[in-house]
Amino acid sequence: MFKKIAFFNLFFLILTLNCFSGEADDPLSVYLTWTMSPETTMSIQWISKNSEMDNSVYYKPFNICDEKEQTPFFHKLATYEKMPDGHPFLIHQVELTDLLPGVIYVFKISENGQLYKFKTIPKELTELKFVEGGDIYRNGIDIVEETNRQAAAQNPMFAVIGGDIAYSADPSNAFFPEDAYRWLRFFKAWTNTMVTKEGFLIPIIPVIGNHETRGGYGQTPAEAAFFYAFFPMPGKKGYNVLDFGNYMSLILLDSGHTHPISGQQTEWLEKTLKARSAVPYKFAVYHVPAYPSIRNFSNAVSLALRKNWVPHFDTYSLKVAFEHHDHTYKRTYPLKNGRKHEKGVIYIGDGAWGIAKPRPPARLIPYVEKSAQSRNFILVTLNELCVTYEAINPNGEIIDRVIQKK
């Protein structure tokens, strides 16, 4: 077995060095995320070859009148670490802080690097749009790019990704090496296609799935080394919360892949929701559905979610739980205590961003209000009065739409 693994690693080395050729100092991909306040920070990551490239980031507020870049750039040094499993690449990361809310910034990697743009989140809510989906690079990268382009065309401020991002790990074997090449292809596609009409890079807010974890379930962060190396997370590794002003909170959860569902994670969830009782828009994001549309309703993971997490969703008035993993589209009725309730929680999604052949959802499920056999992402639009969810396919067609009042 270990001879096969050694051969796999050697083959990967040759393949990646050939596929990602170019100038030594050119990043292979550049992507954004957050570990702290989205109003005043931005975390910039990039992947490079294992070389002595410039580790500097230069940034400043964008000024349309500054055509010759007369305004000086701020300068900050990034940190970096080697890609897991000895692959010949570096993962660089720098946290920009003390930024202004709702402001456009430009940045470049090295003094002569390409200029990129991003926008910080406004402190007060007028209108905010983001896209949500999961199960990304399951099939060809061309399928991913097609959905990416349609998602970017909605001009979202960021994207929430609900696990099974690159399908890089074998969920049935904790000893088989992870396919880092799939991560490189995913990030290259993201850099090239997840850019808004105005040229803003779209930050990623991820959660973990079974295909990020060697062994799938019941593992530790060590078995998801690539996921945790690529994505600096807010707070504890694996489950976190990201707050947007005082109007929205994203609760990012681990559905049993590198942390148990019950115990510490459930206790943390209750405390986190309770502390945000006054936040009007609270959303949970995780991979395996509590209310599946394909898998058996009584599967062990869904049972554990409904036993441990759902009661807290009900108690603290969660708006929506974004679910994935089933490779189709579903939206439940508002549910409370497992039954229809006008003030209940909607469970939406089921993960089909990059699925070539989405599964037909099961018929006549009593808690499902809408289902569709369609690749999709969800466009979420918030304002001071309500939030709208639109499931959109890669052709730009709206396959489902629902509105919740604030």
Image (spheres, helix red, strand yellow):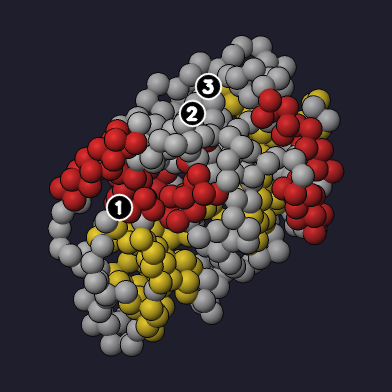
Asked whether, in this view, residue 148 is left or right of residue 133, the answer is left
Q: Which mark is residue 185?
A: none
Asked whether, in this view, residue 263 is left or right of residue 9, the answer is right
Measure the alpha-carbon separation of dots 3 and 1.
40 Å
Residue 93 vertical placement versus 292 (above, below): below
- Which label's residue is closer to the chain start, 1 or 2? 1
Look at the numbered discs 3 and 2 and tell me whether their residues touch, using CB distance below 8 Å. Answer: no
Dot 1, crowdedness within 10 Å: few (<14), some or many (≥20)? Answer: some
Residue 179 vertical placement versus 231 (above, below): above
Amino acid of disc 1: His
The image position of residue 304, as x and y in percent, is 73, 32
Q: Which mark is residue 87?
A: 1
Front-most of residues 174 and 56: 174
Residue at x-position 35% and y-position 40%: 179
Name the residue that disc number 2 marks: 172
Residue 326: tell me if it is visible: yes
The image position of residue 49, as x and y in percent, is 24, 60
Residue at x-position 48% and y-position 19%: 359
Name the residue that disc number 3 marks: 372
